[in-house]
Image: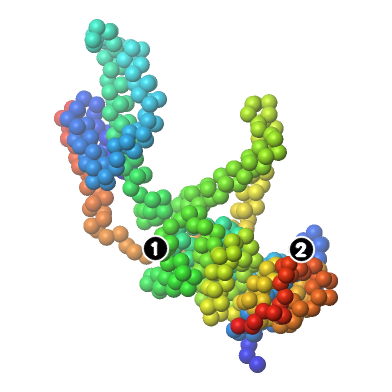
């Protein structure tokens, strides 16, 4: 078997005040896979995501990205390998122009000159945002900003793309456009979402998290079709949505 | 721009011809940049307080007095008024030309190239970037207050304003924390990276320095003549 793009082993974490958040979380993501992480608010999803980039260090257990353990000495390389797209693009896009923002990541990893320009161009092209390169981020729509946020991470050429609620607050057309773009990217993907049809559309596999534990792991269509599991974990399909009627891609 | 303004300020007040040249220079820049007259005049309104001040100077100034249009005014005050009017108008016009022709990111990039400390340009950049976001938040908080029937207008209603200012501060602080996490997630380690490797061409330098050097030549000539 190939080296997993992401390996989380027995990960536990509590906040400094002692509140436990994650309990023995254990899973793998293989190269090329697209995996959704589902679960109710407060399940620990965002906390888990911040571990994947070594922003939080686990109390116990380990995170390994493409064979490299996320320890203090590897922090810099881990952050290049895990491309984290935050939920609010206003948090992610902080530079005066889109171009500078996309260049920020690779420049931190020592990419300069024409190669940096190429990276920026390729990343913006991949999300169809090349024409706004010289505009300030706050002049863009939310859908555009979210696409640019994806580009800022793609420019680092990560091993795995981690998205926190990529479809939240988007209008249906922007949501669809983003799905189209993500679908076309040739990259391993780990996506936190409350948008269950989105998970079904983009990810062949899903994990369900509740109270800091992984309680299910399997094909997305099977998980969404399991009424007992769904109800026990406060997951709700949109009214009238039947996953068994959706044709797989 | 700064060099030009300094040259204007350094020009002795008696050298009327020198101010004429300065005015032609900045007027030329306005023409080349095709700045509409209305745009320029509206922005020149910031001068009004200075103009008012300048108008009163001749009446209240001390020293020798002279008669202008039948009014007795102070010679010293008259000179003061002239200096303020001429120098301020030229300086402000030069700033307007820069503000009208150069986008904020370009100004920051320019400062970077002029070796301004990157921490300062980064802070200025963040300020510009998040001004809209914070104003938007403030606006939404005000709407939320209005929609629940509260419209603080008077000073004794300041409590609500103070609490919303506090809430805004906390929100901005928390956003700062999230932005920092996002920066760290992309490999930030306390030093803003160099993003632009394009060196400034000597042609740009020559063009950028043309107007200030003429202005300085005029200022020095005027000083020598005085």
Q: Callout 1: residue from which chain?
A: B
Q: CA distance from mark 1 to mark 2?
A: 42 Å
Residue B150 x/y as whole percent: 69, 34
How crowded is the residue under tag 2: few (<14 C-alpha within 10 Å), some, or many (20+)? few
Colouring convention used in this rendered image of the protein: rainbow
Residue A224 x/y as whole percent: 74, 76
Extreme left residue here? Answer: B225
- As helix, strand or loop, the secondary structure at mark 1 comes to loop
State the mark number for residue B196.
Answer: 1
Question: In the figure, residue A214 lies in which quadrant?
Answer: bottom right
Q: Callout 2: residue from which chain?
A: A
Which residue in the structure is indicated by mark 2? Answer: A42
Nearer mark to the viewer, of 1 and 2: 2
Residue A106 x/y as whole percent: 48, 70
- As helix, strand or loop, the secondary structure at mark 2 comes to loop
Please say if B40 is above or below A113: above
- Residue at the location (23% across, 42% down)? B31
Lateral position of residue B171 relative to residue A137, left or right: right
């Amino acid at each position: 078997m190939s080296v997993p793009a992401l390996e989380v082993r027995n990960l536990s974490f509590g906040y400094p005040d002692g509140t436990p958040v994650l309990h023995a979380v254990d899973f793998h993501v293989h190269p090329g896979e697209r995996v959704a992480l589902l679960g109710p608010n407060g399940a620990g999803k965002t906390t888990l995501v911040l571990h994947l980039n070594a922003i939080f260090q686990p109390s116990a257990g380990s995170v390994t990205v493409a064979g490299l353990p996320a320890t203090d000495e590897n922090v810099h390389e881990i952050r290049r390998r895990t491309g984290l797209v935050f939920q609010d693009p206003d948090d992610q896009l902080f530079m005066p122009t889109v171009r500078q923002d996309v260049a920020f990541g690779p420049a931190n990893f020592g990419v300069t000159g024409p190669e940096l320009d190429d990276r920026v161009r390729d990343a913006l092209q991949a999300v169809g945002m090349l024409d706004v390169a010289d505009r300030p981020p706050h002049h863009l729509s939310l859908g555009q900003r979210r696409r640019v946020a994806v580009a800022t991470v793609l420019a680092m050429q990560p091993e795995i793309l981690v998205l926190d609620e990529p479809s939240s607050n988007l209008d249906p057309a922007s949501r669809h456009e983003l799905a189209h773009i993500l679908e076309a990217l040739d990259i391993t993907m780990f996506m936190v979402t409350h948008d269950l049809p989105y998970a079904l559309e983009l990810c062949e596999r899903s994990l369900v998290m509740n109270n800091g534990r992984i309680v299910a792991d399997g094909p997305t269509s099977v998980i969404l079709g399991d009424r007992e599991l769904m109800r026990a974990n406060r997951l709700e399909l949109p009214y009238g949505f039947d996953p068994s009627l959706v044709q797989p891609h | 721009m700064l060099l030009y303004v300094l040259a204007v300020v350094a020009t002795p007040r008696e050298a009327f011809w020198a101010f004429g040249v300065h005015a032609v220079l900045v007027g030329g820049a306005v023409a080349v940049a095709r700045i509409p007259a209305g745009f320029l005049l509206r922005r020149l309104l910031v001068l009004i307080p200075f103009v008012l001040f300048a108008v009163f100077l001749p009446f209240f100034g001390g020293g020798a007095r002279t008669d202008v249009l039948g009014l007795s005014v102070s010679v010293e005050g008259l000179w003061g008024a002239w200096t303020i009017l001429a120098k301020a108008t030229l300086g402000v016009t030069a700033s307007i030309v820069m503000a009208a022709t150069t986008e904020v990111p370009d100004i920051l990039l320019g400062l970077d190239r002029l070796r301004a400390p990157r921490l300062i340009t980064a802070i200025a950049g963040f300020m510009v970037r998040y001004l809209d976001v914070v104003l938007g938040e403030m606006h939404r908080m005000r709407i939320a207050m209005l929609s629940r029937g509260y419209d603080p207008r008077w000073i004794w209603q300041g409590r609500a304003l103070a609490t919303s200012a506090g809430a805004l501060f906390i929100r901005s602080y928390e956003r700062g924390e999230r932005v920092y996490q996002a920066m760290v997630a992309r490999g930030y380690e306390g030093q803003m990276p160099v993003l632009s490797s394009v060196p400034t061409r000597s042609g740009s330098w020559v063009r950028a320095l043309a107007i200030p050097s003429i202005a300085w030549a005029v200022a020095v000539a005027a000083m020598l003549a005085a």
